[in-house]
Image: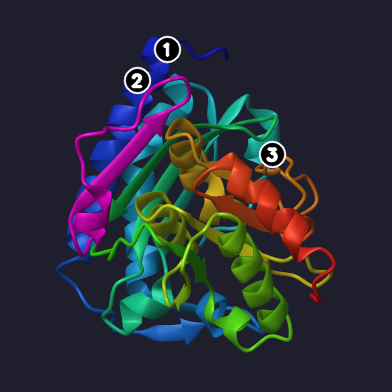
Amino acid sequence: MRLSPSDLAVLADRASAAALRVGRWIATVRPAHVSVKSPTSSPAAAIVTDVDRQAESMLVADLSDTLAEFELGLLTEEQADDRSRFARDHFWCIDPLDGTLPFTEDRFGYAVSVALVSRDGEALLGVVHDPRSDTLLRAVRGGEVDPSIDLAERLGVSRDDNTLALYCDRSLLASQALPAVRHALETVAARRKLRNVAIKDGAGAVMNACQVLADPPACYLKFPTDGPGGGSLWDFAATSCLLGEAGASARDFYGQPLDLNRPDSTFLNHRGILVCSDARLATELWQALIPAPR
């Protein structure tokens, strides 16, 4: 089914209303049950709570009538992939509670994320709600991100125009790649005549990407890996649209568009992630990071 600009506007409104309702509900609750859903090297990716599952049920219920009306598939984090994303021209890609670990620790870093993705893997709309600040961000391909929001202030980001910031997962801080990453950041910062480099961890993938948008010059990266992980489709679908429409860059580690409908997996480990506040920074970092240990 071909979606018109008016169709996308309707779907963006529906996704925004659903994300806002669920995010505001999440802000009022605490998890009653925390479990490990799969073996993984990353504790942040391994845990799931009753709140994740209920949030997903609420989002799917709110968007369920759009599946038939607009002939959409569905991919969510907590349900098995039914492969409808390959049978339809477009599909909802839902992360009901990205950043479950910071949520369980009752600190900044979690969000609701809803995207509409085409079968060829392009995010056509993205909606993110941060429950802690009650901030809703949305973008539609070919549209504009609301410029009236002071995103740094809303998200509590301390801005410094003389600092190059890296937002990262905790796993990077303990990896053998950290010295090479720090050296690459310092190299790029020196070329840009920036005085400082800051490495900030602790948020989930969605809020890391939003902080990159709020705190230029900034970046967020995940190296390619042969093992499972490296983020999932739902971790980056909504923010790739937000970043793109805001003039930032959300690509893989080699500068190619994110493969948001990968046929053989829902992971993005095969080509990694490089999110930057501008495209030139992405190129500079990529050049400075090669060859960095993985």
Q: Which mark is residue 41?
A: none
Mark 2, mark 3: which one is toward the viewer? 3
Q: Whole-Å distance between the Cαs marked 1 and 3?
A: 22 Å
The verdict on residue 102 being magenta is: no
Quarter of the image for the C terminus: give it. bottom right
Residue highlighted by disc 3: 257
Q: Secondary structure at mark 2?
A: helix
Check disc 3 and give the amino acid type. Answer: Pro
Q: Is residue 153 magenta?
A: yes
Q: Earlier in the sequence, mark 1 or mark 3?
A: 1
Mark 1, residue position: 5
Q: Residue at x 39, y 65 (%)?
A: 53
- Residue type at mark 2 is Ala
Q: Quadrant of the N terminus?
A: top right
* Mark 3 Cα shell of 10 Å, populated few (<14), some (14-19), many (≥20): some
19 relative to 48, above or below = above
Tell me where residue 7 sits by quadrant. top left
Q: Are marks 1 and 2 in contact (CB under 8 Å)?
A: yes
Image point (35%, 84%), residue name: 33
- Residue 210 lies left or right of residue 91; in this view the side is left
Towards the viewer: 95 or 60: 95
Q: Which residue is mark 2?
A: 9
Identify which residue, 24 or 139, lies in the foreground. 139
Q: Position of residue 138 (x, y in %)?
A: 34, 37
Q: Nearer the viewer, residue 37 or 123?
A: 123
In the rendered image, the vertical position of residue 294 relative to residue 222, given as above or below: below
| Magenta stretch, residue numbers | 131-155
Foreground tag (1 vs 3): 3
- The one nearer the camera, 11 or 191, is 191
